[in-house]
């Protein structure tokens, strides 16, 4: 619980921290007059030319603001089924490569960057997708039970609600630890429960979605496949972004998933989309890599109840659903996890010591 909480709090601000640690790679100087970006095709081409020809463009991360670089992720195949994962950074105003860095390799379980290390520790405990994702999901489910049972134990059956909601002033150490444990647990519960469940969903969607389908139809973008057509070349990632822009003219691209296999699809996620019917402003568009046809959209304004539920999972987990307020709440709930762990152990030791004295 402490590991999930501390790493989760760090990841709430992962972009800002990564830029702070690597300013020459991840930030650019906005030109005078605030000109627009170069065409996406030029930006992607610059990144592709910076890597060996056999490397695959797997993912693109659109700049989060006017001072951020364009991040392009590549998979580099090596001998004996080994791969390395690289990121190339491009100045969007000039379409020139700033630099690149090795992110991870199949020969080591440890990512090469600080933020990458925190991500892998948070999502998989550095154990890889299998069994790491499964173990973390099981632990998250157990933590949900722990939070719920803690709420039951906290519930003031005597009706003394004020006493249950505050830390008593000038109390003994034992009482202070008790009050700190129960109040931090109570105030973080409303955030921890959705964050823990969304973590399970993001790690094991193929297991969670069938359960959700018992209550409401759900589509998932990884279920869709492109249909190879003879003598038809794949559209480019830039063209996929253009198709998504036509579907949702407002907002800006955020995450762009590349089509890395003959039957895989492009997925373009846009942030800040102004569409009526939902307070979420994130939309993802799944696109056939050959025909350019839109196969699916993650749109909470038109989706089923089950689809709307899944659309909320990432924004809730990251806190981005409610802007800075949501991010700060998730950050604080993450810090509450080590507090709950430490105070819980102290309370257990205190009770154990009292029990031993009674039995002497």
Image: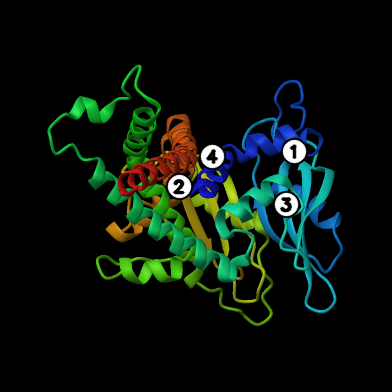
Nearest to viewer (mark 1 / mark 4): 4
Q: Would you name the residue on which mark 1 appears? A: 26
Task: Kindly indicate whether the residue at mark 4 contacts the one at mark 1 (C-beta within 8 angstroms).
Answer: no
> Which badge, 1 or 3, comes first in the chain's sequence?
1
Kindly identify the residue that appears in the image at 59 percent across and 71 percent down: 264
Asked if residue 291 can be seen in this view, the reply is no
- As drawn, which residue projects farthest toward the top? 170
Q: Which of marks 3 and 4 is nearer the N terminus?
A: 4
The CA span between labels 1 and 3 is 11 Å
Residue 320's disc number: none
Q: How crowded is mark 4: few (under 14 residues within 10 Å), some or many (20 or more)?
A: many
User: Would you say the residues marked 1 and 3 are in contact, meaning their CB atoms lie under 8 Å apart?
Assistant: no
* Residue at image point 76% right, 21% down: 32
User: Where residue 105 sits: x, y (%)?
Assistant: 77, 63
Q: What residue does disc 2 label?
A: 317
Residue 143: image location, x then y, percent: 40, 54
Give the SS element for disc 3: strand
- Up-down: is 117 above or below 155? below
Residue indicated by mark 3: 72
Helix, strand or loop at mark 4 = helix
Q: Mark 4 points at which residue?
A: 9
Element under label 2? helix
Q: In this view, does 189 lie to the left or right of 90?
A: left
As measured in the structure, the alpha-carbon distance from the residue carrying label 1 to the one carrying label 4 is 21 Å
Mark 3 to mark 2 CA distance (whole Å): 24 Å
Discs 4/2, front: 4
Which numbered disc flags the more N-terminal residue, 4 or 2? 4
């Amino acid at each position: 619980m402490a590991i999930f909480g501390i790493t989760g709090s760090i990841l709430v601000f992962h972009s800002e921290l990564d830029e702070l640690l690597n300013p020459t790679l991840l930030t650019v100087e906005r030109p005078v007059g605030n000109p627009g970006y170069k065409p996406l095709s030029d930006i992607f081409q610059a990144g592709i030319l910076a890597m060996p020809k056999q490397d695959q463009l797997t993912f693109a991360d659109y700049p989060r603001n006017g001072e951020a670089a364009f991040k392009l992720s590549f998979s580099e195949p090596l001998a004996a089924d080994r791969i390395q994962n690289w990121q190339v950074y491009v100045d969007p105003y000039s379409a020139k490569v700033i630099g690149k860095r090795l992110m991870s390799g199949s020969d080591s379980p440890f990512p090469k960057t600080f933020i990458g290390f925190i991500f892998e520790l948070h999502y998989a405990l550095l154990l890889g997708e299998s069994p790491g994702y499964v173990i973390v999901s099981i632990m998250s489910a157990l933590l949900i039970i722990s939070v719920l049972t803690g709420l039951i134990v906290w519930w003031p059956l005597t009706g003394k609600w004020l006493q249950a909601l505050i830390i008593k002033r000038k109390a003994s150490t034992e009482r202070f630890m008790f009050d700190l444990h129960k109040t931090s647990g109570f105030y973080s519960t409303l955030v921890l429960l959705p964050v823990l469940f969304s973590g399970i969903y993001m790690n094991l969607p193929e297991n969670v979605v069938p359960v959700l389908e018992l209550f409401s139809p759900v589509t998932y973008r990884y279920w869709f496949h492109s249909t190879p057509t003879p003598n038809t070349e794949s559209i480019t990632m830039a063209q996929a972004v253009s198709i998504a822009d036509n579907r949702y003219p407002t907002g800006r691209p955020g995450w762009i998933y590349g089509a890395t296999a003959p039957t895989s699809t492009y997925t373009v996620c846009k942030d800040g989309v102004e569409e009526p019917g939902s307070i979420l402003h994130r939309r993802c568009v799944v696109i056939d890599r050959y025909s350019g046809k839109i196969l699916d959209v993650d749109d909470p304004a038109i989706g089923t109840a089950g689809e709307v539920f899944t659309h909320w999972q990432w924004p809730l987990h990251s806190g981005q659903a409610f802007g800075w307020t949501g991010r700060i709440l998730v950050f604080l709930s993450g810090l509450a996890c080590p507090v709950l762990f430490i105070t819980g152990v102290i309370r257990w030791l205190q009770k154990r010591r009292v029990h031993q004295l009674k039995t002497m």
